[in-house]
Image (cartoon, rainbow, N blue to C red):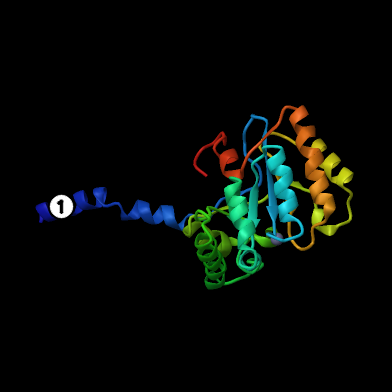
Amino acid sequence: MRWASFILAALFSWFPLPHHRLAVTRPAPLIKQVLTTKKVVALTFDDGPTANWTPKVLQVLKENHVKATFFVIGNQAVKRPALVKEEVDAKMEIGSHGYEHKILRHSSAEVVKQEAQQNEVLLTSLGVPKPTLYRLPAGASDSTALRVLGQMGYKVIGWSIDTRDWRRRYTAEDIAKQVENEASPGAIIIFHDGPNSSEATVDAVKQIIPALKTQGYQFDTVSQLLKLEKFAGR
Ligand SMILES: [Zn+2]
């Protein structure tokens, strides 16, 4: 008997399953800003790709040698795979914004999983590395969504500066001024290159990049920004 309990104890102290289980059931972290003192910010674009706005946004980013993060919707990407490829070729980061842009608050675990998985399958079939970042439509989260996305290996990315460009109520100057005033190290800035975008988004980005560079800021993708995080492990 003593031998039996010794063997059992040895097995349990070694057996990796409990740790492993803890790791995979951890809810996805919800990140709105990266905690760093380095003057780096991330430009992010939701709801694309669209024929009207994605090429123009990409053009501005490329001209300024800026890397950004696109949170792509599957049912837009499936219609315009060439634009997704252009984003990948330009070394932009691609995160998931769901296949159908479903609001996942109050959704069942099955719906959350399907919405994320369907987009994963599509994006990887288009040559995109498996996304590790998820942006929830309307920023609407709940514990089920965060748990399921965490199990799938996602980090959920919110924002610290909301340009509200999709409302088409603000001029490029308004948006640029807001971002210049609110910029801080580790900021995550949300724009849209979706159907509700306008020329104001493109022109605002054109103004923001040189203005923030003058303030000493650099630009990078969300994943690169996360590497500067002061407190590792999320
Ligand atoms: Zn959206």
Foreground residue among 84 and 4: 84
* Ligand number 1: quarter of image: bottom right
Foreground residue among 115 and 230: 115
What residue is shown at x 86% (from left), y 46% (from top)?
A: 172
Relative to 43, 231 lies left or right: left
Crowd rating for badge 1 (residues with CA inside 10 Å; few <14, some 14–19, many 20+): few
Q: Specify the quadrant that holds the N terminus.
A: bottom left
Element carrying mark 1: helix
What residue is shown at x 79% (from left), y 58% (from top)?
A: 197
Q: Position of residue 85 (x, y in %)?
A: 59, 55
Do we see residue 96 in this rendering? no
Q: Where is 227 relative to 100, above or below?
A: above
From the image, tell me which residue sits under label 1.
7
Amino acid marked by disc 1: Ile
Foreground residue among 54 and 184: 54
Q: Position of residue 57 (x, y in %)?
A: 73, 49
Residue 96 figure quarter: bottom right
- Total number of numbered discs in the rendering: 1
Q: Position of residue 9 (x, y in %)?
A: 21, 51
